[in-house]
Amino acid sequence: MPPISTTSHASAPGKCILLGEHSVVHGHPALAVSLSTLRITTTIQTSSTSTSNPTATVILPDVCSVVTSLPLTFTCPLSSLPPPSPTKSNPHNLPTPPAFLPPLFLEALTALVSKTHKDPDDISPFLPFLTLIAYLHKSKSPQSSISVTITSAALPVGSGLGSSAAACVSCSAALLKLLVPLSTPALPHKKLINEWSYLAECIVHGTPSGIDNSVSTYGGACSFVKSDNPGDKPNMFFINIKKPLDIVITNTQVPKSTRKLVKMVGEKKQNHPNVINPVMTSMGEVCKSFVELIKKEKVDFDVVNELFTLSHSLLRVLGVSHPALELVLTTTNKYGVASKLTGAGGGGCAITLLGATDNSWGLDEATRTAVHNKLSGLRWNWTRFKTFRTVCGGEGVTWGDGESASATTKNGYRNWYGATIITGAITGFGVMATLAFLKAKK
Ligand SMILES: Nc1ncnc2c1ncn2[C@@H]1O[C@H](COP(=O)(O)OP(=O)(O)O)[C@@H](O)[C@H]1O
Ligand SMILES: C[C@@](O)(CCOP(=O)(O)O)CC(=O)O
């Protein structure tokens, strides 16, 4: 019998935390936006034959082995993946994730990967994706081989722009796509994608707030407060930013570990609660003031700059800045504009808010270009900074390779509550042609 093959694609965007990183882990409000042009795509191929032993393969072209410097790949018999704990089904008969992963499951998975990969840093990148395969594929199709490839077109790995969440969201989405005969994920599917990707993110980070996977799943601008009770749903609402925001992201290319930084801040909070709790409360207040500000038609740019400066100063107190990030701040301050770190800090990226994309508030266009050029020329330890000028928001997770989601944001701006401002019929025609092409390709 010839093999029966299926292919599934999904793509998910990175994110940028405008305000409230770290304090969000401890229950204070934060605001994040999707970065729809910076996406990670998961491609899945399955094939079933009645004769051969099915296998599970994970290919990570963007994550290199610390031992060989080659991209990480892993293959094992599908049957050797540890048995997942029982899951419940939602009303659409799709599996819902368990409240937590049994430690024995993760131990068995780690032991399995360690048969071929000796360094712990080469083992951990596979664990979230193998977990998702065990829960969402093996339990449904134990006779079918599966190959999962995770690729990032432009989203840098480990720089504070949510690559781990985008990878988990796109992988969860591509696996769920195999179980759903639809071309676009509806709201209940997005809810499930978000829940499964949070479970996978917990494997990468330990105690993530959940803001990264939420904004990568739903897109747009998300105000987020984690629940005090572990396991309870976060308080999350999407914000209608009146005027799309024009930002420059500067990647200092200094490596950092979110897991270590979050742990360090948690310990600081535990050791000095009377000092750190008020700092975090202030960070939440800065975020709340900013949310009120950007809902307005005309934003006071001086207040934006004050809030960004306050937020970064508070993050400094938590100990998560870095001299390379400080260089970004002093550089943009000379142009009268504030910057702040985004994500976990300790290196990674800084953001500079230039104003509204229609120039109704913020810097004038010439100064925006000058700031961007200046940042592009900076270096830290001889490594040149990488910059992206982009519009905040746009499409979240999609089934397909994400080309049209990215194109929509590049060519116009899609506000997340249906008010769509697309730059002209040429773009519309381009998107339709892309969709028609993709459909024909299927
Ligand atoms: N393209 C990718 N493919 C596979 N795993 C990825 C990819 N991008 C990120 N990851 C995972 O996420 C980790 C980085 O997470 P983190 O430090 O939080 O960075 P970020 O701030 O970009 O989310 C990587 O070490 C890897 O395990
Ligand atoms: C520091 C934190 O607030 C954001 C981390 O973002 P990133 O992993 O650096 O992209 C942690 C979290 O929210 O889980």
Image (cartoon, grey):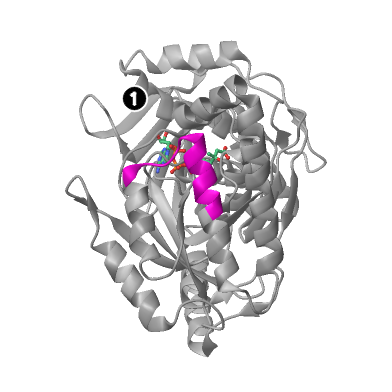
Q: Is residue 325 magenta?
A: no
Residue 442 visible within the image: no
User: Which kind of residue does numbered mark 1 sit on?
Assistant: Asp
Can you name the residue that lies furthest to the right here? 91
The percent coordinates of residue 119 (x first, y second) are 31, 18
Place of residue 138 in the rendered image (x, y in percent of width and height, measured from the top left): 57, 27
Which span is picked out in magenta?
Answer: 310-323
Q: Quadrant of residue 398?
A: bottom right
Of helix, strand and loop, which one carries label 1? helix
Residue at coordinates 37% horizontally, 36% vertically from top-left?
Answer: 256
The residue at 31%/32% (across/down) is 72
**x and y percent of residue 26 in the render?**
66, 34
SS majority, magenta:
helix
Q: Is residue 321 rendered magenta in the image?
A: yes
In the image, taking residue 375 as reference, residue 193 lies left or right, namely: right
Q: Which residue is mark 1?
A: 122
Q: Residue at x 64, y 71 (%)?
A: 415
Query: Does residue 390 appear to the left or right of 202 in the view shown?
Result: left
Say few, some or many: other residues with alpha carbon within 10 Å of mark 1 (under 14 / 14 to 19 / 20 or more).
many
User: Where is 250 relative to 159, above or below?
Assistant: below
